[in-house]
Image (cartoon, grey):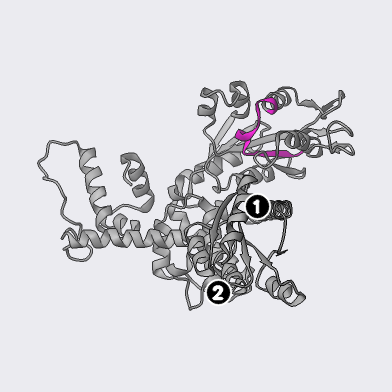
Amino acid sequence: MAKLLVVDDEPGICSTMEAALSAAGHTVQTADSGELALSLMRRQSPDILITDLRMDGMSGLDLLGKTREYFPSVTPVMMTAYATVDTAVNAMKQGAHDYLIKPFTPDQLEHLVSRIEEFRRLRDENSRLKDQVETLADPSVINTQNSKMQRIIDMARRVAASDSTILITGESGTGKTLLAKTMHDASVRAKGPFAVVNCATLSENLLESELFGHVRGSFTGAVKDKTGRLQLAEGGTVFLDEIGEISPNLQTKLLRFLQEREFEKVGDTKTIKVDVRIIAATNKDLEREVREGHFREDLYFRLNVIDLHMPSLRDRPEDIPALAEQLLARSFAASHRTPRPLSNDAKRVIIAYPWPGNIRELKNALERAAILCTVDEVTVDDLPDRVAAFAASSALASAAAFETGEVARPPGSTPAAPYPVNSEVSLEELERRHIQHVLATVGTLEEAATLLGINLSTLWRKRRRYLIE
């Protein structure tokens, strides 16, 4: 279901559309002006904006232009009772995806929203596949100075020669697909296919057909025979991404395939044997899923012959500067703009920001910065609001510490410890308090690491160990 924002200066229109769309299961907000609509979108962007053309104050066309500029992920629709070719052309020029002519019925409205939902689904899937192709074409994503990451890559290259099933774990966006492709390329199967199946994006029936294939007439819509990915990847590797999302029924069928290397197409009785290697990946804790009864224990052990855990980007901060420079250069090239460097402040923020979306989030942030940058270097203001807000909150924390007198110290010196040195506490507790105090005192993690005399990677590990926010 979609999140919609309806904008019209006629209250009756807003209430009628809200009732119809809510009855269809959508989440709906309304606004009686373009100004209010922009304010609502700043708080939480909707999926779809439906705006009237003629309104007091800001017109619908002006609202479309600002939506395209500031909220590019929103899909806008223009509605009007004054339908002409000129207004339609102008609306499309301002970024309108579609055109709705008043009066319209609830069925027409729901049909329009359904079409847009399908368009957005296909667009997002295309974007995901594009990211996947770009990631596979860019080995710099796993170039690393981090010792833990280096061990993972070294182990991956050593186990690549075997045919053992591999399970790659780690958060979304950490490069699991690229690691799988690296192992395929280093194996004896390198000349064979490398097939990627995202288990999270398909329904159970479609995923079963995607993996095993089907015969004509086996289910509604099966108008011809289909060969599954397992058979098409003969002699190569099949990468099952987000394996933790598959249904219990498919878990059973996949277990049988891993044990016997054979299967039947959906709706067929003929057994097919194939020679493929399976590499699976998940961002879930499969051990917990097993304990909670959501994932078969025997399948887990079949998948987890060799486990490779990809560290998050915040666990390898020493890799962020070089990776950011490479991704930024690619973003400028993709937008056909002259490359510009990161400002020193932007570098500090990028290193300090925790990047919950990992490499994928960093790539998207720098792509945005490359588009928005208007000066000789990329500044903090060019980064997404959440990253800039993180920088602002860090600055506020530093200012608050300064106001309390905790940072009245010579530049480069370590602040006085906020506890008596003769306290009867453990050395670990003293270290925890000292790190916590330094973090509250300075503006960035880079400065904290410098004051503490340790590198960023060590600081990240100690923060996790002591549960320091």
In the figure, 81 relative to 207: above or below? below
Can residue 332 be seen by looking at this rendering?
Answer: yes
Q: Is residue 230 left or right of residue 415?
A: right
Viewer-proximal residue, 149 or 96?
Answer: 96
According to the picture, the residue beneath numbered tag 1 turns out to be 128
* Callout 2: SS: loop
In the figure, 400 relative to 245: above or below? below
Q: Which residues are magenta?
A: 236-250
In the figure, 194 relative to 379: above or below? above
Q: Position of residue 53 (x, y in %)?
A: 64, 71
Viewer-proximal residue, 407 or 180?
Answer: 407
Q: Residue at x 60, y 42 (%)?
A: 157
Residue 363: quadrant of the picture: bottom right
Q: Residue at x 46, y 43 (%)?
A: 148
According to the picture, the residue beneath numbered tag 2 turns out to be 56
Q: Amino acid at mark 1?
A: Arg
Q: Position of residue 132 (x, y in %)?
A: 65, 52
In the figure, 251 relative to 48: above or below? above
Label 1 to label 2: alpha-carbon separation: 40 Å
Judge the density around disc 1: few (<14), some (14-19), many (≥20) Cα neighbours within 10 Å: few
Viewer-proximal residue, 343 or 15?
Answer: 15
* Callout 1: SS: helix
Q: Is residue 354 left or right of residue 52?
A: left
Q: Is residue 251 left or right of residue 339?
A: right
Q: Amino acid at mark 2?
A: Asp
> Is 448 included in the stretch rendered in magenta?
no
